[in-house]
Amino acid sequence: MNSQWPQLLASQVGRTGSVLRDRPTTMEDRAQSSPRLRRAYGSPYLFSVLAWVTILLLFTYPRVSANQPNIIIFLADDLGYADVGFNGCQDIPTPHIDSIAANGVKFTDGYANHPVCSPSRAGLLSGRYQHSFGFENNSGPEEYSAPNFGIPRDVPILAERLKEVGYETAWVGKWHVGFNEGLRPHERGFGYTYGFHAGARTFYPNGPRQNHQMFRNGKPFDGETEYLTDAFARDAMAFIDRSGPEDAPFFLFFSFNAVHLPLEATKKYENRFPDIKDKNRKTYAGMLSALDDAIGGVMSSVRQLQQEDNTLVFFYSDNGGPTPQTTSRNDPLRGYKGQMFEGGIRVPFAMQWPERISAGETYEHPIMGFDVTATALAAAGIALSADDTLDGKDLLPFLDGSDDGLPHSQLFWRAGNQHAARVGNWKLVKPRGQSEMLFDLSQDIGETKDLSKSHPEKLKELQGIYDAWSSQMEEPRWIRQDRRNAEVGGKLKTAASSPSRSDLSQEERLERLFQADRNGDGRLTRREYQGQFFEALDRNGNGVITRREAEAVIKQTSSRSSREATKPSASVPSNAHRESGAA
C-alpha cells in the first residue's frame, strides 16, 4: 500500500469511490511526474541503495504469515436489535448488512460490552472487560471531559497489535475513547485516520461546537462537504482501493456515528421510504439506509480487489437502540440503550470470512464485543504472552466445530448503580433504584417474568458470581461530565464526585418524557416507555401513564431539596426523560 496516499486523499476530498486512481501510485510514476524525483531516481547508485534497503526490509518485515486475512469492523452506533433484516426488520431494507450474515454467521445472542457507547468501544478495541482498566462511564462533551478519559496507554488496542505485524491500519468515523494527547486514533496504531473524536455531532459537514471538529491524521480538517456517513464511506473505500493482493494486509475500523442522535438524513435517503409516515422513523430509516449503502460500498471495493474470500468482516452495534429518542426497535427484547435489560445490551451481530466460515450459519450461544479483537488477533496469527491475556475469545474454533464447548459460560456488565450477569440461560439484572431481578432467557427472552421471589437460591448464586467478578475490576476512573456539572463547582474530574440534578424545568421534563408517545394519544404504554420509573409514574397501576399522573409525580419530586435530589432513589423520575443514556 502506497504510504503517500493519505496526503493525496486530502487534496481529493470532493471526489468519491476511486478518488485516487488517476494519481501516481509507484515510485516510477512519481518520478516521471517530477523532474527532481526523475533526476534522483535515475541515479544508478541511489537505485542500488534503494534495492538493498528493500531487500533488507523484506527479510526483517514483522509480518507473521503470508496468509493473514484483511480485517474490517463495521460498528454501528445505537442500532436496535430488530433494525436489521436478518433480525426481522420489515420497514427498512438493509441488504448489505444482511449479506454479511448470509455469507457467514449471525449471532442470536451477541452482546455489547456496555449499554452505552464509549465503554462498549473500549471493550471492543482492548479485547477486555473495560472495567479492568477503569473505563466504566461515558465522557460527556469533550470540553467538559476528564483529562484522563480514554483507553490507557499501557492497554494495547487491536490496531496497535496488528500494525506491529505489518498490517496497514485505518480508522474512519467516531472515536469516543480518548480526546487528549496520546489517546487519539492517530496515536493508537492507526496509520490513516479521519473522523471526529467526540461522542456525537451533526451529520452535516461543519458544526459550531468543539466536539464537531473533524480530524484527518490528527490535524483539524474543515474541508468536508458531504453528508457525514457518505464522507466516511468515501474515505473507507479509498483506503481499500489503494490495497491489492500483493500488498500488506489491511485493517479497517469503520466506526459509524449513525444511527446516533441527532436525527438527520438527506432527502436522497429519506425519499426511499414514502410509506413511513412517522417523521422521526422516516429520518431514522434514511440514516440507516445511508449506513447500509456505506457498508455496500466498502464491500464492493473489497470484491473489486478479489479479496472478499480472504477478508474477515464483523458487524455489530455498540449498544441497544434508544427507542424513545430515535424510534429504534429492540423487539422482542425489553428495554433500550442505557439499561441492563436485553434491549440495552443485546445487539445485531454478524461475521463473515468465506475462507473459514460457512455461509448461512446461525450461532445461538452468548458472545460479546471483546470477542471481535480476540478473533481478529487469532486470525492474524498473533500469539499473546501468558501475562497478556484477553477476556474475549477466538470465535473461530466454536464456529468451525473444532471446539464443542462455549466461548463464555458467564458474562458481566456494570454501569454505576446498575449491573447484570448472564450465567447460562439465567440472567441477573440490577436496574437503577430497584431490587435485583432474575430471568430465565431460555423461556423469557423479553424479561417479563421476574423469578427472584420464586428462585431466591438462584438469585443469590448469580449475585455471588457477579460480586466475585466485580471485586476484581477497577473503580471508575471518571464520571460522565457535562455543563450541569460545571455549573455547580467546575469540572468534576474524579469518580468520587456526584453529578448534579438536571436543570430542566418541570414542563421540559414532562415534554421530554412524552417524546416516547409514538401514537400521540397523550398516554404512555409499557411498550412505548420501558423505563425503570414506569411503576412510579403509573400512579393507579393500570399499565398506562397519563400526562396528569406524570405531571403530579414530577411536581412532587421537584419540590425536594437539591441535596436529596442528587441521591440515587427508586422514586425520583426526574431522570426518566434521559434514562436511555447519552452518547
Image: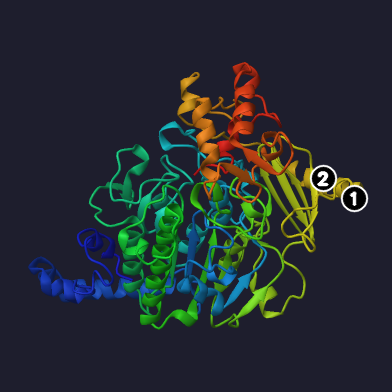
Q: Residue at x 71, y 57 (%)?
A: 446
Residue at position x 36%, y 81% in the image: 304
Left or right of residue 58: residue 356: right
Secondary element at image label 1: loop
Quarter the N terminus occupies: bottom left
Which quarter of the figure has residue 132? top right
User: Residue 61 — which label?
Assistant: none
Q: Is residue 270 left or right of residue 64?
A: left
Badge 1 density bin: few <14, some 14–19, many ≥20, Cα 10 Å: few
N-term-proximal mark, 1 vs 2: 1
The amino acid marked with disc number 2 is Gln
Question: Residue 510 vs residue 33: left or right?
Answer: right
**Residue marked by disc 2:** 463
CA neighbours of label 2 inside 10 A, class few (<14), some (14 to 19), many (20+): many
Does residue 167 appear in the picture of this structure? Answer: no
Across and down, in percent, residue 426 comes to 80, 56
Q: Nearer the viewer, residue 521 or 256?
A: 521
Q: Position of residue 406 (x, y in %)?
A: 75, 68
x and y percent of residue 560 in the render?
Answer: 63, 18
Q: Tell me where residue 88 sits by quadrant.
A: bottom right
Question: Which numbered disc, 1 or 2, marks the residue closer to the eye?
Answer: 1
Q: Please state the horizontal and vertical placement of residue 68, each as a whole percent of the image.
A: 50, 75
> Which numbered disc covers residue 455?
1
Quadrant location of residue 83?
Answer: bottom right
Label 1 close to label 2 by CB (< 8 Å): no
